[in-house]
Amino acid sequence: MRKPSIQLTLQTASLVTGFMMWVLISSLIPSIKQDIPLTESQVSIITAIPVILGSLLRIPIGFYTDRFGARKLFMISFTVLLFPVFYISVANSFIDLVIGGLFLGIGGAVFSVGVTSLPKYYPKEKQGFINGVYGVGNAGTSITTFGAPIIAQSLGWQKTAQLYLILLLIFIVFNFIFGDRKEVKVKQSMAEQLKSVCKNTTLWFLSLFYFITFGAFVAFTMFLPNFLVNNFNLDSVDAGIRTAGFIVLATLMRPIGGLLADKFNSFIILMFTFIAVTLSAVILAFSPNIELFTVGCLAVALFVGIGNGTVFKLVPLYFSKQAGVVNGIVSAMGGLGGFFPPLVLTAVHNITGQYSIAFMALSEVALACLVIVVWLYKQERTENHRKFIGKTKEL
């Protein structure tokens, strides 16, 4: 196999590119609305729709990465992405944006490639940090959220979207040249892998944790640009900069979360994560001004970033033989966690005229996750104690 450092760099850069595509519509919505009349409900659907395919495709992409390798999966994904990106650049209706946005989800689905491929190159004691470094590819959402509105002011949103076609072509070539042709492959049927893991409750607990941590990251990334413009009267560039700040902080904390999980008990880190998210969501629910809302958002970014890195330390520990399909399931649940909040926020606002109830819902779900993590931690300690007693008796 080629040098691990080359694959880590290439796959992380490829994830940056994929995530840049994933949030293209949500970043350009303020500009698109000037040419295509859209209601707030339609905007919520458009910004949430890329998450659907970006989540569901993570399961087969994770599986086929194990079978065919990261090089082929990145090349195929970026080739397919050429079509929805171009389609969006010539869109002139709500339906066009929905269709294009749905297939943009492929950009988010490529996350499963690296978390399945990269652990093959590194020992277990480094996998939390390595997956965290790969997760820095989330910064692609920040680049588009910050950069796309600025470029759109000069070139228009149509030409801005077309510029992204060039980036896709570049990374198709990069993966063709530098991708690892000799990556270790795993040839096991998807049905067998799914059958062996689906009855394992740990899988679904990890999926729930990632549903909250990564789901919150995606939801805030998709929803904040339009939310800040409408509720705090910011211009689109200012809203993009603030959203980019959220993304950067959450992204930088991901490898730190992985590193902490390599050195300390992952469940303890998750306890702190869900305590902090619970309190931060309460702050968001009762924020009367942009200053306090910013504090709440940055606190969420800080701790969901740590949580994201921690969860993917646990996956290879519990499911080393089914890494591809399990990575796909867990990351898919995380993506779906970003689909529902924008719709719920809009629905709550339409009914009540404010967003507090929706933010409080995030707080309550995070609190429920805290209870589950405490239970898992106690189970782990009990199991370790039993093993210790068993070894002592043998001696």
Image (cartoon, rainbow, N blue to C red):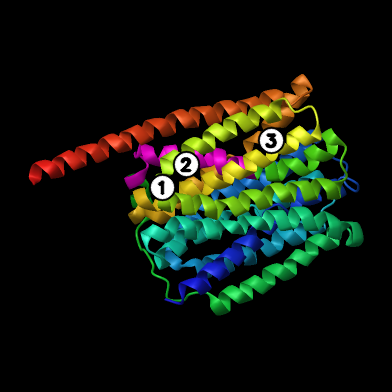
The residue positioned farthest toward the top in the image shown: 352
Residue 134 image point, x, y percent: 54, 60
The mark that comes first in sequence, 2 or 3, is: 2
User: Magenta includes 122?
Assistant: no
The mark that comes first in sequence, 1 or 2, is: 1
Q: Which stretch appears magenta?
A: 196-217
Residue sitting at x 48%, y 54%? 259
Quickly name the residue at label 2.
269
Residue type beneath disc 3:
Gly
Quickly name the residue at label 1.
264
Residue 248 vs 81, above or below: the answer is above
Tag 3 secondary structure? helix
The mark that comes first in sequence, 1 or 3, is: 1
* 15 relative position to 128: left or right: right
Tag 2 secondary structure? helix
Residue 151 image point, x, y percent: 85, 60
Residue sitting at x 76%, y 62%? 86
Q: Are marks 1 and 2 in contact (CB under 8 Å)?
A: yes
In the depicted view, which residue is nearer to us: 331 or 256?
A: 256
In the depicted view, which residue is nearer to us: 246 or 229?
A: 246
Q: How far is the residue under mark 2 from the one under mark 3?
A: 20 Å
Residue 224 image point, x, y percent: 74, 41
Residue sitting at x 66%, y 56%? 139
Q: For residue 88, which quarter of the picture?
A: bottom right
Any part of residue 120 in sight: yes
Residue type beneath disc 2:
Ile
Quickly name the residue at label 3.
296
Does the magenta stretch mainly form a helix, a strand or a loop? Answer: helix
